[in-house]
Amino acid sequence: MNKAKDLSKKTETPSQKPAGEIFLENEKYYQLIVEHMPLLLGVIDSCGKIRAWNKYGKKMLGYGPEDVIDKMSVFALTKSEEEAEEVMRLAMEKGVYDNEINFVHKKRNLIPVHLVIFSHKDEKGRIDYFYGFAEDITKRKLSEDALNKAHEELEVRVQKRTLELARINVALQEEIAERKKIEAALRKNEEHYRLLAENITDVIWTADLNLRFTYFSPSIKRLLGYTVQEALEKNVSEIITPGSFDLAFKTLKEELAEEKKKDKDLARSKRIELEHIHKDGNVFWVEVTVTFTRDADGKATGVLGVCREISRRKKIEDALRESEERFRSLVECASDWIWEVDENAKYTYASPKVKDILGYEPQEVLGKTPFDLMPPGERERIRSLYTSVVKTKKAFECLENTNVRKDGKIVVLETSGVPIFDAKGKFRGYRGIDRDITERKKTESKSSR
């Protein structure tokens, strides 16, 4: 019988067991969670020496339990002893330290982490050790940097100096304001994020290699509306949509095939997005991170998963895509030619309108400078003016200049631009618009006769 048919059967309710067996079984689940959870879990004594360390530390920082337990102190993991002492001081004073910090990898590079440390007191009220966890937030930091960069570029674009782009600017300002609200809400949500055993907000679960559930953390009630016992009786196909069911088993099949390789990564994990079905019938997106639980020989014995609801993030991604597409459509339809040049005045972007104004396809002008498209005398005049503007790194507007179309005809353009700076404030070029005023100049010339 294939796996899908096996999984269509309900998991039988476990028979009543003695309290001792239940305790040992729960201890086994907790041990599996600690050893295979994609978080660094550890214990340090009051002097800073590491007394406990799970296997994920090897993947995250390059140190396995055998490298650090009773051998290293927490001071070796931070940029300075003062920083580690400050963490321990705050944990002692407040009972918990919860913040972002940089750890030092075995290879000496810095790893950004979300660190949560708790202090423990003995019977006399004295602190005898600290325990806690660290989550690698490198990907989140990269995403935030990329989001901030995109945000900065978008704000620069809305500074165009034409009446038509002014309307675009208003629309974009509204989009930016909305996005800032969403980002603030997301940051606030992340600040409350906790991941530690039974108190974790995300759902931790284990299953056998046929994806029959064997454990759920209590937070399953918050995520899907089921009690732990109700969830254990559910089949995978009952809590995710058919499309996600197919993806889940496809992923499991691929990972089981990977297990047959000799050089497989025993600490690897897989992250997929699946549509889950709430007890009330509501369908929503969940990010699922899975890894194998293993025996002493490294053989896969089951699956450990962590589920996180990402409906808000999916909405943000959709909103950002719609915002970027809306801006792109407005730019492509603008009556003026929109362009960008780098610090060497070479075109890095040209809107399709360049075809109507100068007769060139956008890709034909990329890598050229504005001066390459001008008659010799005009070229030197404008180059001199542009050099003066670049020295000030300020915006300029309504600069009239003569250009030669691809077919040899002369056109007069009116150019405006604003400087571009990167996230570090370094000058990167100009972004602006060109408007064809050839007919206007002809009219003015006739009127002056």
Image (tube, rainbow, N blue to C red):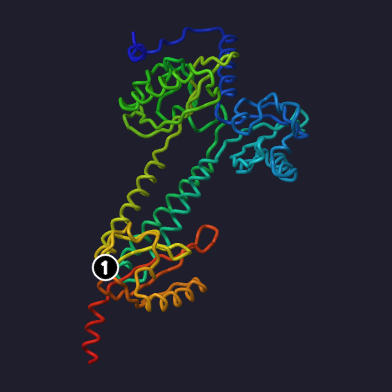
Q: Residue at x 42, y 22 (%)?
A: 254
Q: Name the quadrant of the C terminus.
A: bottom left
Toward the viewer: 210 or 269? 269
Position of residue 145 measured from the top left corner of the image (x, y, whole percent): 50, 49
Q: Residue at x 62, y 37 (%)?
A: 116
Q: Name the quadrant of the N terminus.
A: top left
Position of residue 92 measured from the top left corner of the image (x, y, whole percent): 72, 39
| Displayed quadrant of residue 355 | bottom left
Of all residues shown, which one is farthest toward the bottom?
A: 449
**Dot 1 crowding, Cα within 10 Å, few <14, some 14–19, many 20+:** many
Q: Residue at x 31, y 66 (%)?
A: 337
Toward the viewer: 65 or 352? 352
Residue 206 vertical position relative to residue 428 in the rendered view, above or below: above
Toward the viewer: 139 or 240? 139
Residue 176 vertical position relative to residue 259 in the rendered view, above or below: below
Q: How many marks?
A: 1
Label 1 amino acid?
Answer: Ile
- Find disc 1 in the rendering and name its residue: 357
Q: 421 left or right of 11?
A: right
Position of residue 423 measured from the top left corner of the image (x, y, whole percent): 52, 57
Q: Secondary structure at mark 1?
A: helix
Q: 361 left or right of 207?
A: left
Residue 8 vertical position relative to residue 250 in the rendered view, above or below: above
Position of residue 357 measured from the top left corner of the image (x, y, whole percent): 26, 68
| Displayed quadrant of residue 50 | top right
| Displayed quadrant of residue 171 | bottom left
